[in-house]
Image (spheres, grey):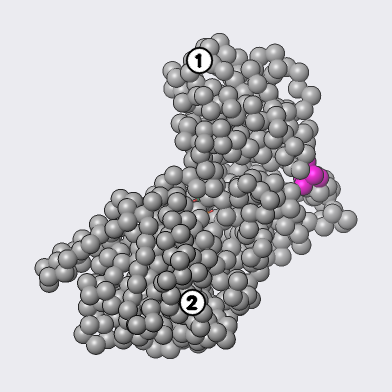
Amino acid sequence: MCGIFAYAGSENAVPLLIDGLRSVEYRGYDSAGISVIDESGSIQTVKRGDHKSSLENLAEAVSSGKLSGQVGIGHTRWATHGVVNQKNSHPHSSSDGTVSIAHNGIIENFLELKDELIDSGIEFKSETDSEVLAHLIGNAVESGSSLREAVIGAASRIRGNTAVVAVSAAEPGIAVGLRVGNAGGIVIGKNDSAAVMASDTIALLPYINEVIYLEPGEVVEIERGVIRLFNLEGSVIERESVVTAQNFEAAQKGNHPHFMSKEIAEQPEAIQGALRGRADFAAGTLDIPEITLTRDQIKSIDRIILTGMGTAYNTALYGASVIESLARIPATAQNSSELRYSNPVLNSNTLVIAVTQSGETADTLAAMEHARQAGSPVGVVVEFEGSQATRIADFTLPVRAGQEIGVASTKTMIASMTTLLQLAVSLGQIRGILDADRVKQIVGQLAELPSLVATTLELDGEITPLAERLATFGDLLYLGRGDQVPIALEGALKMKELAYIHPEGNPAGEMKHGMNALLGSDMATIVCAPKNGLYEKMLSNISEVKARGGEVAAIVTEGDDVVERIADHMIQVPDSPEILQPFMTLIPMQILAYRTALALGRDPDKPRNLAKTVTVE
Ligand code: F6R
């Protein structure tokens, strides 16, 4: 959700805050704002609440260089409480303007606190939950507390997950950060002339490659060249910084028009990243060194639950299907927001595997914590290696796709699928289900995956006219069977989030149980029908749609000369071993959504009402 950034140093903070916000803007773009402590010691705040153009408008507003100061905070918003406008934009100020805060998360008891503050005579300027923090902290500072003490005091009053940064005119050299629960991280770094903190490591990389992660229940004070950590009792915490593997250049768009097109194109390398150090192509063997469970523990697993949200949930569905099929362990996927409330049977023989690009999704973290408390071993398939999910999990399987900035997950999904396929092989091997020959065969097939995906990416030109056609529909149906169901669901998810067309993703067998009522010329159907054991059943589904006047676009295996006789449009993906087919059909789904979004004039990197890292429930 929202992005926060703070700077305390020797340079003018204003352009650095704008640059920092550019790095975290993918977390929310409803508004953008900064507060700096100017030369006279007053806090100056500039903000814009203009949806997607907020940050550019803010940059323009401060471009004259008149505003300057060496300490400041900034925020990009994904609105939860209060509509998108200037007054609800962060930072928010205390009544006398001497404290300013930028907040990420939700204050669950904000109405109660707001009433209390209003009764004490405070006038609220916004409809946000966050503004209560500005007043709680402002009141404490006015009564003589230091900014750090005031922030710690506010932490004891609020419920819910929160990350906040604050500045006070009374202490013009410092900024303070607080993390309560899992509301997206705060990462801190310093060099001799500055200290910075942000929601995301990427915003710190221009300064430093060694970072400190703030844990839940901790406060940080930054000052030029100094970082001080405290717990909520105010005691000092010592923590060494860690070197981050993230790379600033890798998180830039380069020559691509959008992050999404860049990330789609990077998928062959993303797969290679996920295979590195695991699959040995020369020997035909596979080992996942990051799995810390003992062989006995692995043998005693009697059930696996995979969990995630959105695309990560679709990836979890794929993972469950491939694990059950290759390792013969009962495996299901559950939406993380439901897991802990569904009272699942969890014990030490249930392995829970979370899938998450960011490692900060609030529901996914809550599901992981729930599983841990129930005594289940927990693993995470994740892109961000320093994220909170990696600190909750017993073992971490990094997917190593490289930082993904586009709001819609693409390369991290394919790298997570690659990781889960290897996990399935590894579990099957350890449990004696897959012998060395079968493992060698799969490893040989995996060796071909990056180049097969690279060839599939060349379909872009062919997909564009189909995307232009799909852009004329208001409703779309996506169908698949077996391991193509998660791909059909993902195709539908991508299309809705990027093109804002209403799609339904369904197992193809389900259509007769309700969906068929909607078939007709005003709904197009996208079918995943590669040549596999379920192909003929998919042919029947295509015919059924055609018989009811529907238009069909089919994603099929190269050389298919049957589907072209019944479908209206065909995208032929490279012929591949069955085990790799979901990878082949995923690519056209991503490109279709991207191209349809462009055909409709949408911004695929900033879909409306969405943000990359969802740190609220
Ligand atoms: C859709 C998309 C989202 C994320 C979801 C989980 O394209 O990207 O559905 O997959 O918000 O995010 P992570 O993977 O960070 O837990």
Q: Which residues are magenta?
A: 448-452
Query: Of the numbered discs in the image, which one, if any, rests on residue 521?
Result: 1
**Which residue ends up furthest to the right in the rendered image?**
282
Q: Is residue 245 left or right of residue 525?
A: right
Residue tagged 2: 12
* Helix, strand or loop for disc 2: loop
Is 388 in front, or is 141? 141
Q: Is residue 498 above or below residue 273?
A: above
Q: Residue at x 74, y 49 (%)?
A: 268
User: What distance separates the C-alpha of mark 1 from that of mark 2?
Assistant: 60 Å
The secondary structure making up most of the magenta span is helix
Q: Residue at x 37, y 61 (%)?
A: 47
Q: Residue at x 60, y 66 (%)?
A: 385
Q: Position of residue 195 (x, y in %)?
A: 51, 80
Task: Tell me the quadrant of the picture where the C terminus can be found.
Answer: bottom left
Report the amino acid beneath label 2: Asn
Q: Is residue 279 above or below residue 330?
A: below
